[in-house]
Amino acid sequence: MPEPNEIDIAIVGAGAAGLMAAISAGREAQRRKSPLRIAAFDGARRIGAKILVAGGGRCNVTHHQVGEESYAGGSSNTIRKVLRRFDVEQTVDFFRNMGVKLKREETGKLFPVTDSARTILDALLKAAADAKAELRHPERINAVRRTDGGFLLEGDLGDVRCRRLILACGGKALPKSGSDGAGYAMAKALGHSVTPRVFPALVPLVLEKSCILRSLSGITLHTRIELRSGTGRRLKSFTNSTLCTHFGLSGPSVMDISRYFTAARFEDAEAGLFACWLPDEERSSVDVQLQSLGKRSIGRWLRELLPERLAEAVFETADVDSSTAGHQLGRDARRRFLDALFEMPLPVTSDRGFTHAEVTAGGIPLNEIKASSMASSRCEGLHLCGEICDVDGRIGGYNFQWAWASGHVAGIHTVDSLIG
C-alpha cells in the first residue's frame, strides 16, 4: 500500500469541474482495472458551495443548446473541441444514470426536476465515492512544484506527492466559496501565464447615485441592453429580463453584457451601455404610433406598455410632460422621447465585483492547454479544467457545461497518461 502522502492523481479544487474530473478519472481507472489512487483536495468546509447557490438554489445544470458562440475568452476553436467531447446529451445521460432527471424550461435551461441544487451535489458526491475518488476537505493546498516523476503539493495538513496533477481551482468569483485566485499562482509556478486581465463576469452593474433607475427597485421587464463604443459603434447586445435594483441593474441581460462592457472599457473609456425598453418594437413604427395618437396623452399610451414607475422615468429622462397629447408632441420632444425609450444611456460607475460575480473572465490562456486532453503544453503531467481556464460563458448553464466537459476530458486523459 502507498504511504498516505503518495497518490497517483491529485485534483486541486472540488467544485463542479474538480468533482467531474475526480469521477471521470475514477471511473476510467475502474474500467481499465487499474488501482490508481485519486484524491481531490479543497479548502472549504462544505464542498460544492457554488453548485448549491447556482440558479437561485436550483442549479442550472446546462442549456439545451450549447455552442462555442456562447462563450468569451480564449480560442473558440479550442472551446468547441472540448464541448464536443462531452456534450449536452452526454451531460443529461450522465446525471440520468446517477438517478437525477433533468427538465428543460422555456428559456432552454436544464434543471433537476426536484428544483434543488442539493440533488445535483449529492449525486456528484456519491458518484465520486463510487468511483473510489477521495474527497479531502477542508484540506487546502497552498503551493505546488514540479519534482522528479510528479509534483509536490504543500498543504495545510502536510505535503502530498502525486504523479499527475489536475488544477481545477476555479477563478476569483464568489470568493466565500473558496475561489480566491490561488490557482493562478500554482499554474504560474508550473510554467503557465495568466491573461493580462482577470475580472468579474456575469455580474450586476452599479449606476450613478443620481440615476433615476435606482429608484425603481423591483421592476423586471424584457429589455435589450446594448454596448457601444465611444464613437457610437454597436459592439454587442443582449435581449432578456432586466432587473432594476437599489444599486443599479441586474438580471440576465445585464449579467451577460457585463464582461463585454468591462473589457471594452479597458480599451475605450467612453464605451457605454444603452437600454431599449421596447425591444420587440421598431423605433420607426413607434414614431408613427405617436404621431397618430391625436388627443390621447402619451402618458396613457406608454403606461399600457411599461410599468408605471418606469414610464415616469422615461418621461423624466426625455424631459417630456406625460400629459402631452399626441398631436401636441413636437418633433424635438418626440425625438427625445424615442431616445429615452430605445436608447436610454446607462451611467455605469462599476460592477459589484467578484463577491457578486458568477464567473471569472480571464485565466490560463487556452493556447497553453491541449484541447484533446486538457493537458498543459508547458508542464508534463499537468492538466487544467473549469474556471481557471480563460473561458467564461453566458448565463444559463453554459459555465457548468464547460466545467462538466473540461473536467471529464481532464479526468479521462490523466488516467490514460498513466496507463497508456
Image (cartoon, rainbow, N blue to C red):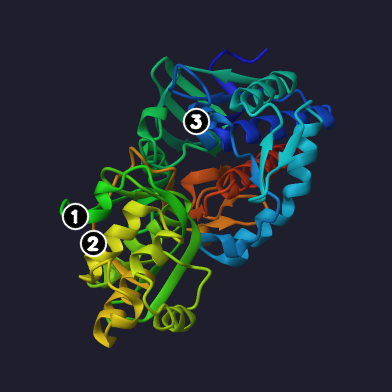
Label 1: which secondary element: loop
Whether residue 9 appears in this view of the structure is: yes
Whether residue 28 appears in this view of the structure is: no
At label 2, the amino acid type is Pro
Between tags 2 and 3, which lies in front?
A: 2
Label 2: which secondary element: loop
Quadrant showing the C terminus = top right
Residue 378's x, y, as percent? 50, 53
Label pair 1/3, CB-CB below 8 angstroms: no
Apparent side of residue 22 relative to residue 326 in the rendered image (left or right): right
Residue 318's x, y, as percent? 24, 71
Quadrant showing the N terminus = top right
Q: Residues within 10 Å of mark 3 (few under 14, many from 20)?
A: some
State which quadrant residue 95 falls in. Answer: top right
Label pair 2/1, CB-CB below 8 angstroms: yes
User: Which residue lies under the disc numbered 3?
Assistant: 53
CA gap between label 2 and label 1 equals 6 Å
User: Which residue lies under the disc numbered 1?
Assistant: 208
User: Which residue lies under the disc numbered 2?
Assistant: 347
At label 1, the amino acid type is Glu
Residue 292's x, y, as percent? 44, 82
At label 3, the amino acid type is Val
